[in-house]
């Protein structure tokens, strides 16, 4: 009898395991076939999954991430839906991911941000249509997690994800630039050298390799460089940021779509040179002069070197009127150069 009971119990156990495996297979089948759901059905499905996932994470001990993983799989399967449908799905997922990422479990936060990276890479394979701004919505969970999460490992992974996205998909980013630049700018406030270095590498990559697509956010890129010039904790990054102004200036000169960037009716009477002066060259020169007037001794010397090197390299491109405008601005720093002796900065720029 004991042997029969043991055999029967073992049989029940095997049946239970088979049933459990079949259930898992069946559930996976539902998730993978969610791409066939009607628009209203998939939106409802994602909403209910988010409710279950929150219950598993916030009410279970230990937290269970099963449904969280499945939600992100479903999102990945359905990312090629029409933009209207995907927008409805993301309007549910975005606040859900922000809420879940604030959970005390570090591993869950890391999982969330890596999953958003994968979704972002998939999403950015397609260029954004003109007058659409969905990319900015897509990056918002990234922004919230990187800026507000208390774990350094999470913020670091988030910044590395941003760097990877810029390297791989920078040419396809459109409305997402403002969020990306805001993330990079905030990294200056973390007081973490490693994070600052990653953020500056992202900024340098934008200026070097993605200037044309990012030029629609010209002022944001410029202010981001300013932030690192003045407020980065590393003197080395301060110096590199100042040198980045030179690359910035050169790429702005090469920018072919200058008239499209500033196409308002207000500027139709402006020549290309006037546009470049008012919206680019003048701003960069004024920022460098601000560093010369307000920065520490080392930054002042670096800023003077960069400023005069820019003027020397691009002198043939400037008209007589433009030079008159430049000399009016330069007059404000002549006393700094004279009184503090910057003739020794480098012979090549004098």
Image: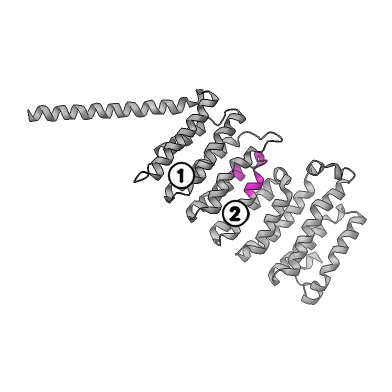
Cβ–Cβ below 8 Å for labels 1 and 2? Answer: no
Front position among marks 1 and 2:
1
Q: Residue furthest bottom?
A: 339
Mark 2 secondary-structure assignment: helix
Identify the residue under disc 1.
111
Q: Which residues are magenta?
A: 165-180
Q: Residues within 10 Å of mark 2 (few under 14, many from 20)?
A: many
Q: Is residue 238 left or right of residue 33?
A: right
For the question of whether residue 60 can be seen, the reply is yes
Magenta residues, dominant SS class: helix
Q: Which residue is mark 2?
A: 199
Regarding residue 200, the answer to whether it shows in the image is: no
Q: Nearer the viewer, residue 74 or 59?
A: 59
The residue at the point 86 percent across, 49 percent down is: 273
Which image quadrant: the C terminus? Answer: bottom right
Q: Tell me, yes or no, whether the highlighted magenta stretch contains residue 171.
A: yes
Of the image marks 1 and 2, the number of the one nearer the N terminus: 1
- In this rendered view, identify the residue nearer to me: 111 or 94: 94
The vertical placement of 315 against 99, above or below, is: below
Q: Report the residue at 70% width, 42% height from top.
A: 213
The answer to if 109 sits in the magenta stretch is: no
Question: What separation in Å lies between label 1 and label 2 (alpha carbons)?
Answer: 21 Å
Relative to 254, is 101 on the left or the right? left
Image-quadrant location for residue 85:
top right
Residue drawn at 34 percent across, 46 percent down: 62
Q: Residue 209: x and y, percent?
A: 67, 46
Placement of the N terminus among the 4 image quadrants: top left
Q: Position of residue 272 (x, y in %)?
A: 86, 46
């Amino acid at each position: 009898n004991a042997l029969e009971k043991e055999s029967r119990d073992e049989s029940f156990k095997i049946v239970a395991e088979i049933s459990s495996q079949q259930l898992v297979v069946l559930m996976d089948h539902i998730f993978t076939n969610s791409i066939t759901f009607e628009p209203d059905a998939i939106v409802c499905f994602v909403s209910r999954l988010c409710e279950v996932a929150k219950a598993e994470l916030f009410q279970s001990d230990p937290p269970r991430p099963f449904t969280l993983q499945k939600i992100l799989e479903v999102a990945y399967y359905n990312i090629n839906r029409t933009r209207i449908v995907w927008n409805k799905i993301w309007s549910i997922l975005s606040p859900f991911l922000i809420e879940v990422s604030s959970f005390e479990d570090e591993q869950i936060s890391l999982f969330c941000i890596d999953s958003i990276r994968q979704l972002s890479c998939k999403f950015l394979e397609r260029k954004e249509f003109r007058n659409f701004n969905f990319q900015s919505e897509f990056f918002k969970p990234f922004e919230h997690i990187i800026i507000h999460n208390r774990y350094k490992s999470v913020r670091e992974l988030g910044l590395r994800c941003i760097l990877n996205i810029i390297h791989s998909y920078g040419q396809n980013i459109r409305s997402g630039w403002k969020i990306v630049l805001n993330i990079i700018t905030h990294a200056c406030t973390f007081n973490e050298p490693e994070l600052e270095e990653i953020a500056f590498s992202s900024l340098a990559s934008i200026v070097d390799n993605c200037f044309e697509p990012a030029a629609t956010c010209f002022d944001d890129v410029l202010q981001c460089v300013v932030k690192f010039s003045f407020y980065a904790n590393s003197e080395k990054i301060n110096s590199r940021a100042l040198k980045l102004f030179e690359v910035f200036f050169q790429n702005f000169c090469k920018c072919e779509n200058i008239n499209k960037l500033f196409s308002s009716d207000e500027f139709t009477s402006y020549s290309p040179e006037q546009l470049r002066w008012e919206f680019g060259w003048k701003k960069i020169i004024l920022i460098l002069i601000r560093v010369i007037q307000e920065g520490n001794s080392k930054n002042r010397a670096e800023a003077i070197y960069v400023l005069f090197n820019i003027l020397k390299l691009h002198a043939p491109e400037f008209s007589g009127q433009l030079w008159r405008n430049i000399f009016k601005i330069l007059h404000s720093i002549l006393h700094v150069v004279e009184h503090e002796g910057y003739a020794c900065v480098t012979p090549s720029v004098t």
